[in-house]
Amino acid sequence: MWKRWRQRIKEWWLDRPHEPGTVVKNRYTVTRMLGMGSYGISYLVFDRMQNEERVLKQVRPSRLNSPKGRPLYEYEIELLATLRHPQMPYLFDAFEENEQLYYVMSYIKGSTLEDMLFQQDASFTEPEAWRVILQILTLVKYLHSRRIIHRDVRIPNVIWNDGTVYLLDFGLARYVDDSPSFLQDTDSHYWLEKKLKREVHPRSDMYALGHFLLFMLYSTYEADEDEPERGWERELSLAPETVRMLRRMLQFDQPYETADELEKDILTFLQSYEKENSQKT
């Protein structure tokens, strides 16, 4: 027990974030911390050379001496350097300073879907939710065409800006043919990877998109506090086609093996929906 507390205190001390105003590499001025994950700390910074806002990511100091601290950093920046998509972050810089590892990416303005749903009370109808999924699916297809599986397509990792979605956070992204040493991020966390179906296969991104879709569909659901939870199939009034697709995305039924397969079904559903509604008017 004491060893665990001592380790936590040590991590807290080592992982103290940079204060606003801190200058890194004599170029990047910290504006504020954006967040801290299991392996890294993100900051909004001002690039004094380019007069632009950027995102600076720092490997948590407490992770630097772990067996995968530096290798995972090098892996992520190499993967990010291959991405050239306007709806994904662009890698500008990667460097080491004062025995700390950093990299710099483009700053994408907007609101995460998580903030929209839980702080801004945004709501999505069934077809609206599917159209958002279609946009994200285009980005997922881009990655899959490069044999990259994102493995972390969640509402905090998608930004919405004026009707366009952007996909962030590639810390768990892996190439399909990677060795097991990179697929299993840490021995202690591998059970969680399996539980969340984060296998390095396209269907794992479809599984994540299924949960993503449910968050949006529940935005219009009004719960009866006297009613026990009944599961999404009973609580939500959904079209049979949506239920069928969701069951496949969530791997209750035959999983989607490719993003193209899912995209085809979504487009068919939306075309049918629009045709049916045009006939009513």
Image: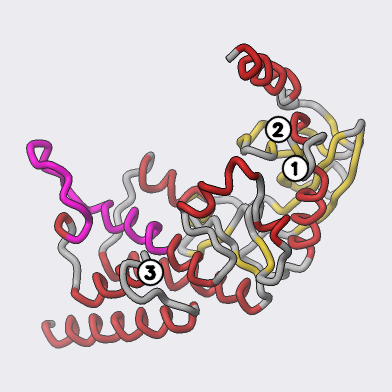
Q: Which residues are magenta?
A: 209-233
Q: Closer to the N terminus: mark 2 or mark 3?
A: 2
Q: Closer to the N terminus: mark 2 or mark 1?
A: 2
Q: Closer to the N terminus: mark 1 or mark 3?
A: 1
Query: Which residue lies under the disc numbered 2?
Result: 31
Query: Which residue lies under the disc numbered 3?
Result: 249
Query: Which residue lies under the disc numbered 1?
Result: 56
The secondary structure type at the circle numbered 2 is: strand
CA distance separating discs 2 and 3: 40 Å
Q: Is residue 107 left or right of residue 127?
A: right
The picture places residue 224, in percent across and down from the top left corner, at 10, 42
Q: Residues within 10 Å of mark 3 (few under 14, many from 20)?
A: many
The secondary structure type at the circle numbered 1 is: strand
Q: Amino acid at mark 2?
A: Thr
Mark 1–mark 3 contact, CB under 8 Å?
A: no
The picture places residue 127, in percent across and down from the top left corner, at 29, 70
The secondary structure type at the circle numbered 3 is: helix
Residue appearing at x 14%, y 87% in the figure: 279
